Structures are given as structure tokens and as C-alpha cells.
Image: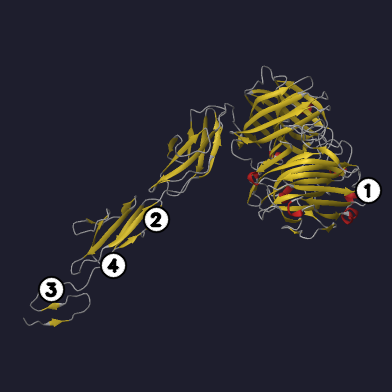
């Protein structure tokens, strides 16, 4: 057959004379919007083709579409992982190739900012929304950590309340978000301890049921342990989210201070000290240290945190890790402002041994050391020359490397030290210490360290050092579990830390023939803004043998000043101290209002006190309240809902805010001079609420 062919313009047919006609062009392949990809939430998928008037047929089950497949007209709801396939067809066009778009759905990210607020027999939960979430689940348990095997309940929004819980028991919570891709991962864990107490008008400050204390909520010293075991003194400290040391010298520490009475410690020597790697950790800007130090300050500057550090001189040697590995170090510095936000070495001349180099920050000099290795540390002040001498031995240092630091130029140029010699009233303290701090401007680091000390020798008033304590339990030395009170001014044994869903504060003291009182707990990070403190306190156990002992727990604060002449910022002179006590010895709850009669509030005079009728302390849970109404000038004291209102202005002037504001929750033990008398407490604290 003769064929006559003729090429036509684009978009027309190629006519073949005497034969059937075939399309010469193909419809455009459909496009998908949004495109194939991974998504959290359901998508409305639109299909389109560049070929005008074309119909689009599609499938969502992965099969190849045909002319009998669904015809696209409105967006396709895609809420599960699937492949959408489609082709276009139009009269006069060949069918387009099949296009395909795979949509994969993953679960939403875990909720953030989980918050648990305790209520009566329940805990109210809230959290931040997760993008793409269509619902949430809450998992909870009385043991940590929470897992997806724990009981759960559904929540449609970003809050819910878990009911039917037991008051006084810690519960742990975590939330998940669910969406088109299923259920996501667990959020960070929160905790709450249901309480029968009224919290009207109050804001939760800290439930005190998490793993570690928060340095932005609580001032130093933070979590701490001091005890004697196995012939060594063990000092432990830990803190998370640390406040920058450069703000107000926040150093979280566990300290054993030499009890030298009125004498001066001129030499402090630790024969053996080590830092076990298994109990040492740090993150962010957190730095951990353990060592010995001699502290000097003009007596006029000895005020309260955070303003009692002006012109303080500290000589310190020890072991530290700021992220570059353990280093043996020496540091001799002075504080140039009241809060010691600025440390300096200006005016101090150093002589360091070979191998010691400046460490980051420029305030320390040191050399590499090793965890789990015993070292010897000797620190002394030559009172005749005013020069500090130090020696570090053991490990790579062998018999020892030594150096000196001479602060005479600084002292001579500093008004605060005029007429105040280091060799005399300038001496403040001699300590062995474990501590953590964050030197960065931002703060937020964390640290934990345990240090072991033994064979401590002390030289007094320039005399050669003699054995002070070998912690063996032999006569005159500390015996497990406590530091001997006549050797250590922070003696006994104590522990402050979060454990088993509560802040646990334990203290134990045995009289060594002198009267002693020890108190431990937590101090609010912003006491000046807090007018009301409420906390749940349980006196779980106590010991008190003999007359004159005391064992109690308390909520306490300095709320206003009475205008006493001589008062000044960070001096507690004239500040009014209000407290509610739970006494294990008398089994009674009492309140007191006292006036601080010296700058440190180490001495007080009683303004007023009273007893809560019908309250038995026992070993149960009690809700304790101290409230100051600075407008009406009225204190409200409360225990378990029993309230007593007291107007102190009838007894003492209300001249203005406290010069040295303080709010704290702590436990105290006291023993008389009768040797062998014992006092101890075991206190649990939860649910700290405040009003400002």
C-alpha cells in the first residue's frame, strides 16, 4: 500500500494515509504536592499534570494504576506510610508514564518541659506540645526510671491529672506523643509526691524527688556527704545546673574544717588523698576538685553569702578536672569584690616547679595526675615571711614537687588588709574539701566527686605539724562513721542529697566533751524574693541520748531588719529570724522569732515563741509553713493546717528588708559537753512551695 506521510505541527497527529491514526505526544507525568518524603503529621496530597484537560488516575495501595483506578478530583488524605502512584490520560495523547511518591510517617518528637504539680492524692501534669501529635500518653511508676511497660493513661491535650495516688509517695512520670507515624519516645522524666496540704496561692518551687539538686534553685553547699569509713574520711559533693561561680562565687562543696579553737592553723598536711574515678563525673562547664586550703580574710569582711568575700585570700592545692583530665594544681588568689565574682592573682609572686604550667583560666598552675592514685599534700604559711609553701608528692611526683606564693605586694596595696596580719586575726579557716563549680559565664554545668583523705597532720601557730587525725578509731582519732567533733568543727557524719524520691538529710553527732550543734539542709537560691515557704517534712527517725541533746527539722528565714545601728548589706545584725521547728526530742512543733545580734547571726536573742497545740511530731509527714506579710507586718506559722498569726512589730521595729536575707529547710542535731552523748536525725523533705 502506498503511504503518504505528512509531518504536522507539534500537538497534532501524524497522519498516515490509508492507516489507523496513533497519538504522537504523551501526556505529562503527574506531580505530587507535598513531594515524597518523611513526615510527622497527615498530609493532603494534591496531584496535577501539565497537560490541559487531562484526567489523573491513582492508587494508594502500591499497585500500578489503570484507567479503572480512582480518578483524582480532591486532595488525597495520606495519614499512614504509603506509596501514591498516578498517571495522566487525555484525548489525543498517549498515557503518561506512572509517577510515584512514597510517604513515610514517623512518630512526633517526645514532649518537652514536663511539669508535675502535687495535689491531694493526685498529680497534675503538663507539657509542651509536639508538632504533629494527635494525642498523648502518660506513663507513671513509683520506681525510676519510667518505661513503656509502666501503667499508662491517654491524654488528648497537653495536660492531664493522674488520680488515685497515695499521699507522701513519690511517683515518676513520662509522656509520649502519638501521630500518623505511631507513638514516639518517652519524654524526660518528671516526678511528683501527692500531698494533702493546701497549696492555694503558692507556686511549686521544687518537688525534691528528682535525681540531683538544681544549682539554680539552691545555694551552696548543695548535695554533700561527710563520713569516716575504712580508716579514711570520705567527702562527697554533687550538683547539676550549677550557677556560674562568676556571679556570686557559688561553689558546691563538702568540707571538713579543722577545729583549732582560737589557734591558727599554719600547716595542713594530708598524708594520703585520692579521687576514685568511679565516683567522679562532670559535664558542660562543671569542674570538680578535692584538696586542702588555708583561708584568710579581714575580720570586718566576714559577712554572709553572697557578700562576705571581700579581700579573702585562699591558698589551695589538690586534684581537679575541668574536662582536660585530672590535674594536680596549686591556686593562691584573692577576691576583689564582696561576692568574689572576680578572682585575681595580681600582686602575688609565684615560684612553681618544672612541669607545672598555667591551666585554663590563668588562676591555677598544675601538671597531669591520675585518678585512683594516692598523693600527699602539704600546705603552709611561713608567718615570719608571709610566704605560702606547698608540696605535692606521690604518683609521677615521687617524693614531691614544691613551690611558693608570696602575696605581700597585694596585702600591702589593699586597704582591707591594712593593719591586719595574716599571722593573727587574718586567719579564718583550714579545710579539706571536695567541691564542684562552673567557671563559665553561662553556668549550667554539673559535677560529682568523692575524695578520700587520711593521715591528716596540723601545725598550729607556726609549730611543726603533728598527727591530727588518722581516722582509725584509736583514742583521740575519728572513728566510723563520724568525724570527731573536737577535731573538726563540721564534725559528726552527715548526708544531704536526693534519694528514693525525697531530699534525705541525715546527721549524727557524738559529743567529744564539748557542746556542739550541727545543721544541714538546703538554702534557697533567691531568698530575697521569697516571702512564704511551705514544705512537707517527715522525721523518719532520730536518736537522742541524755539531757541536753536536740534533734529537729525546721523551716527558717531572715525576713526583715529592725534598724539596729551598724547594719549593712550581707550583715545579719538586726535581721529577724523566724522559724518553725519539729522537735524529735520533745515530740512538739514550735515557732520562734529571734533577732540576730552579730553579723553572722551566730548569736540571737528571742523575741517570741509558741507551741502548736495537739501536734505530735512522731515519725509521720508534716506540712510546715512560714509566711511573712510585709505589708501587714504579720507572720503566719503553720503545721498541718494549724495556723498561728503573730505581729512582731509590737515587739521589734520593722525598719526594712533583711540585710542578709536567707531562707532554708534543714535538720539540726546538738550534743552537750557530756562525752559520749549522741544525737541523730533522719529527715525526708518534699514539695517546697513558695509565694513571692
Q: Outermost residue toward the top?
A: 614
- Quarter of the image that includes the C terminus: top right
Q: Outermost residue toward the left?
A: 1
Q: Residue at x 85, y 48 (%)?
A: 380
Tag in front: 3 or 4: 3
Residues at discs 2 and 1 in contact (Cβ within 8 Å): no
From the viewer's perspective, is residue 228 above or below residue 645? below
Of pointers 3 and 1, the one earlier in the residue sequence: 3
In-front residue for pair 183/405? 405
Determine which residue is flagged by label 3. Answer: 21
Determine which residue is flagged by label 2. Answer: 38
Residue 215, position in %: x, y?
66, 43
Q: Does residue 312 appear anywhere in the picture?
A: no
As measured in the structure, the alpha-carbon distance from the residue carrying label 3 to the one carrying label 1 is 116 Å
Of pointers 3 and 4, the one earlier in the residue sequence: 3
Residue 220, position in %: x, y?
71, 41
Q: Indicate which disc residue 50 carries.
A: 4
The image quadrant that residue 424 belongs to is top right
Amino acid at each position: 500500500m502506498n503511504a503518504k506521510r505528512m509531518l504536522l505541527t507539534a500537538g497534532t497527529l501524524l497522519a498516515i494515509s490509508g492507516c489507523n491514526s496513533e497519538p504522537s505526544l504523551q501526556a505529562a507525568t503527574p506531580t505530587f504536592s507535598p513531594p515524597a518524603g518523611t513526615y510527622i503529621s497527615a498530609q493532603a496530597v494534591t496531584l496535577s499534570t501539565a497537560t490541559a484537560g487531562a484526567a489523573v488516575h491513582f492508587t494508594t495501595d502500591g499497585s500500578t494504576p489503570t484507567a479503572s483506578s480512582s480518578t483524582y478530583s480532591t486532595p488525597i488524605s495520606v495519614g499512614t506510610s504509603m506509596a501514591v502512584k498516578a498517571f495522566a490520560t487525555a484525548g489525543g495523547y498517549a498515557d503518561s508514564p506512572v509517577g510515584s511518591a512514597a510517604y513515610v510517617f514517623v512518630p512526633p518528637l517526645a514532649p518537652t518541659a514536663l511539669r508535675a504539680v502535687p495535689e491531694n492524692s493526685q498529680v497534675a501534669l503538663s507539657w509542651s506540645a509536639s508538632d504533629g501529635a494527635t494525642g498523648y500518653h502518660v506513663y507513671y511508676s513509683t520506681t525510676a526510671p519510667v518505661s513503656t511497660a509502666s501503667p499508662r493513661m491517654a491524654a488528648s491535650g497537653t495536660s492531664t491529672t493522674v488520680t488515685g495516688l497515695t499521699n507522701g509517695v513519690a511517683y515518676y512520670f513520662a509522656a509520649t506523643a502519638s501521630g500518623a507515624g505511631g507513638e514516639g519516645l518517652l519524654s524526660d522524666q518528671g516526678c511528683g509526691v501527692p500531698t494533702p496540704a493546701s497549696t492555694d496561692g503558692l507556686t511549686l518551687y521544687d518537688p525534691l524527688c528528682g535525681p540531683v539538686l538544681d544549682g539554680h534553685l539552691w545555694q551552696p553547699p548543695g548535695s554533700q556527704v561527710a563520713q569516716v569509713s575504712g580508716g579514711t574520711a570520705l567527702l562527697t559533693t554533687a550538683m547539676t545546673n550549677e550557677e556560674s561561680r562568676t556571679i556570686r562565687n557559688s561553689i558546691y562543696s563538702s568540707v571538713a574544717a579543722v577545729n583549732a579553737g582560737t589557734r591558727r592553723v599554719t600547716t595542713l598536711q594530708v598524708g594520703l588523698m585520692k579521687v576514685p574515678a568511679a565516683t567522679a563525673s562532670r559535664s558542660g562547664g562543671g569542674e570538680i576538685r578535692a584538696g586542702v586550703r588555708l583561708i584568710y580574710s579581714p575580720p570586718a569582711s566576714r559577712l554572709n553569702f553572697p557578700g562576705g568575700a571581700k579581700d579573702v585570700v585562699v591558698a589551695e592545692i589538690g586534684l581537679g578536672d575541668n574536662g582536660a583530665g585530672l590535674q594536680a594544681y596549686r591556686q593562691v588568689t584573692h577576691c576583689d569584690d564582696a561576692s568574689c565574682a572576680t578572682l585575681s592573682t595580681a600582686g602575688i609572686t609565684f615560684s612553681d616547679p618544672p612541669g607545672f604550667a598555667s591551666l585554663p583560666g590563668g588562676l591555677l598552675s598544675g601538671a597531669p595526675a591520675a585518678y585512683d592514685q594516692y598523693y600527699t599534700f602539704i600546705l603552709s604559711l611561713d608567718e615570719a615571711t608571709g610566704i605560702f609553701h606547698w608540696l605535692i608528692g606521690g604518683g609521677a611526683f615521687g617524693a614531691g614537687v614544691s613551690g611558693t606564693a608570696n602575696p605581700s605586694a597585694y596585702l600591702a596595696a589593699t586597704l582591707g588588709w591594712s593593719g591586719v596580719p595574716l599571722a593573727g586575726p587574718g586567719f579564718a579557716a583550714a579545710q579539706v574539701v571536695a567541691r564542684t563549680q562552673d567557671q563559665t559565664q553561662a553556668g549550667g554545668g554539673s559535677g560529682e566527686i568523692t575524695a578520700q583523705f587520711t593521715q591528716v597532720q596540723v601545725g598550729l601557730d607556726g609549730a611543726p605539724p603533728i598527727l591530727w587525725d588518722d581516722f582509725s578509731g584509736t583514742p583521740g582519732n575519728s572513728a566510723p562513721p563520724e568525724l570527731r567533733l573536737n577535731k573538726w568543727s563540721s564534725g559528726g557524719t552527715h548526708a544531704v542529697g536526693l534519694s528514693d524520691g525525697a531530699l534525705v538529710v541525715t546527721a549524727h553527732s557524738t559529743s567529744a566533751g564539748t557542746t556542739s550543734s550541727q545543721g544541714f539542709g538546703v538554702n534557697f537560691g533567691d531568698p530575697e524574693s521569697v516571702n512564704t515557704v511551705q514544705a512537707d517534712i517527715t522525721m523518719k527517725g532520730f536518736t537522742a541520748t541524755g539531757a541536753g541533746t536536740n534533734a529537729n527539722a525546721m523551716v527558717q528565714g531572715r525576713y526583715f531588719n529592725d534598724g539596729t545601728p551598724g547594719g549593712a548589706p550581707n550583715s545579719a545584725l538586726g535581721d529577724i529570724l523566724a522559724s518553725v521547728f519539729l522537735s524529735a526530742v520533745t515530740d512538739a512543733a514550735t515557732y520562734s522569732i529571734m533577732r540576730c545580734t552579730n553579723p553572722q547571726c551566730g548569736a540571737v536573742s528571742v523575741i517570741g515563741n509558741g507551741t502548736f497545740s495537739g501536734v505530735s511530731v512522731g515519725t509521720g509527714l508534716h506540712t510546715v509553713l512560714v509566711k511573712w506579710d510585709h505589708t501587714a507586718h504579720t507572720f503566719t506559722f503553720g503545721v498541718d493546717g494549724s495556723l498561728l498569726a503573730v505581729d512582731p512589730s509590737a515587739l521589734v521595729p520593722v525598719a526594712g528588708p533583711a540585710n542578709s536575707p536567707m531562707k532554708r529547710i534543714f535538720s539540726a542535731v546538738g550534743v552537750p559537753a557530756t562525752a559520749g552523748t549522741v544525737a541523730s536525725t533522719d529527715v525526708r523533705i518534699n514539695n517546697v512551695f513558695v509565694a513571692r
